[in-house]
Image (cartoon, grey):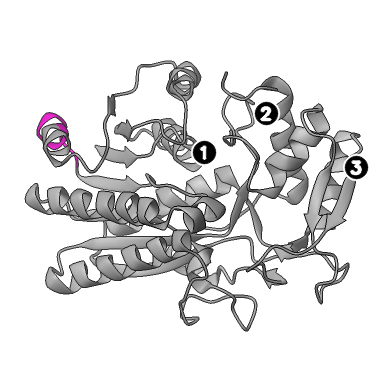
Amino acid sequence: MILITGGTGFIGSHTALLLLENGYEIVIVDNFVNSSREVLKRLERLIGASIPFVELDLRDEEALEQLFMTYNIDSVIHFAGLKAVGESVEKPLYYYENNIGSTLVLCKVMEKFGVMKLVFSSSATVYGAPELVPIVENTPLHSTNPYGRTKLMVEEILKDLYISNPNWSIALLRYFNPIGAHESGEIGENPNGTPNNLMPYITQVAIGKRKELYIFGNDYPTMDGTGVRDYIHVTDLAYGHVKALEKLNKSTGIDAYNLGTGKGYSVLEVVKTFEHVTGVSIPYKFVKRRPGDIAECYADPSKANKELKWEAKKTLEDMCQDSWRWQKKNPEGFC
């Protein structure tokens, strides 16, 4: 059985659904800080069965031990964590305590129960402002904000853990920019307050919740002056976790993998593609750059292609179409 921490979040819920569809047994843990109870209901509706779920904070060691005693867990996918870059700058201690503290307790309990297979939800933020693109896994690591540093610190902790006990099998999955939604429109990205990411901002403008899209900077050294990012469909990303699990079941060790498409799209390209596939006009306004933003960031995913037998298949058109379907069907999110 696979334990999915943060399994009602955006990426966690899509991964949970894909695992269930592929015949895996799972148990989800979440404390609903970044998600909604409604997600669990929708997952159960989509799969046509009840899903084992425990509400707890991963820092509660006693409760976590009880969960491991209750369920026959053999591997863990660790999504749980705070994830807003801006908030992390305002509340660094909150982020360090939550993201690192919860991982320490999780690993301690896993080791106690002899569970040594772990897929960790990392991020391309561990590369900071890379000098070269596309980004490969051995690019020097550094981060420009507390959120990214928590991911980087956890990666270092997990490397030390493997050195201390080579029975561990760990995959560090470095996500680029997940967008899109499940094709049913039942689950998708549901940001709290003002969206931090481009696509939910676009869809909220499209649905009429916001007047216009703010584009941060149009003077970057890119094809149209706007920032370039590697956008990946969330269901492609979810599939990367299934493939990582398959690898962990065959070997020990620790490895990092970029999960991206290998192609960069500018903000304006995303806006124009969204308008093209939906027929909805997106008014936008250029504003000054945000501190710390970089011109280009996209992956070289060839290591994941080769070692995990995984590749992203969905197009930017698919990502826009599925994001819009989710937003139209759920104008107020999971309310």
* Magenta segment boundaries in residue numbering: 67-73
Q: Is residue 151 visible?
A: yes
**Label located before the other in sequence (3 or 2):** 3
The local crowd at label 1, few if under 14, some if 14 to 19, many if 20 or more residues have their Cα within 10 Å, is many
Up the image or down, 284 lies above or below 104; here it is above
Q: From the top left corner, tell me how far across and down residue 202 is, in percent.
A: 77, 41
Q: From the top left corner, tell me how far across and down residue 23 is, in percent.
A: 36, 33
What amino acid type should be assigned to the residue bearing mark 1? Phe
The residues bearing labels 1 and 3 have C-alpha atoms spaced at a distance of: 26 Å
Q: Is residue 264 visible?
A: no
The numbered disc on residue 326 is 2
Q: Secondary structure at mark 3?
A: loop
Q: Is residue 246 left or right of residue 202?
A: left
Up the image or down, 244 lies above or below 179; here it is below
Depth order, front residue of 334/168: 334
Q: Nearer the viewer, mark 3 or mark 2?
A: 3
Q: From the top left corner, tell me how far across and down residue 61 is, in percent.
A: 15, 42
Q: Which residue is mark 1?
A: 10
Q: Which residue is mark 3?
A: 283
Q: Is residue 255 left or right of residue 261?
A: left
Is residue 294 found inside the magenta-colored segment of the image? Answer: no
The numbered disc on residue 311 is none
**Label located before the other in sequence (1 or 3):** 1
What amino acid type should be assigned to the residue bearing mark 3? Pro
Depth order, front residue of 158/319: 158
The residues bearing labels 3 and 2 have C-alpha atoms spaced at a distance of: 20 Å
What amino acid type should be assigned to the residue bearing mark 2? Trp
Q: From the top left corner, tell me how far across and down residue 280 is, in percent.
A: 89, 34
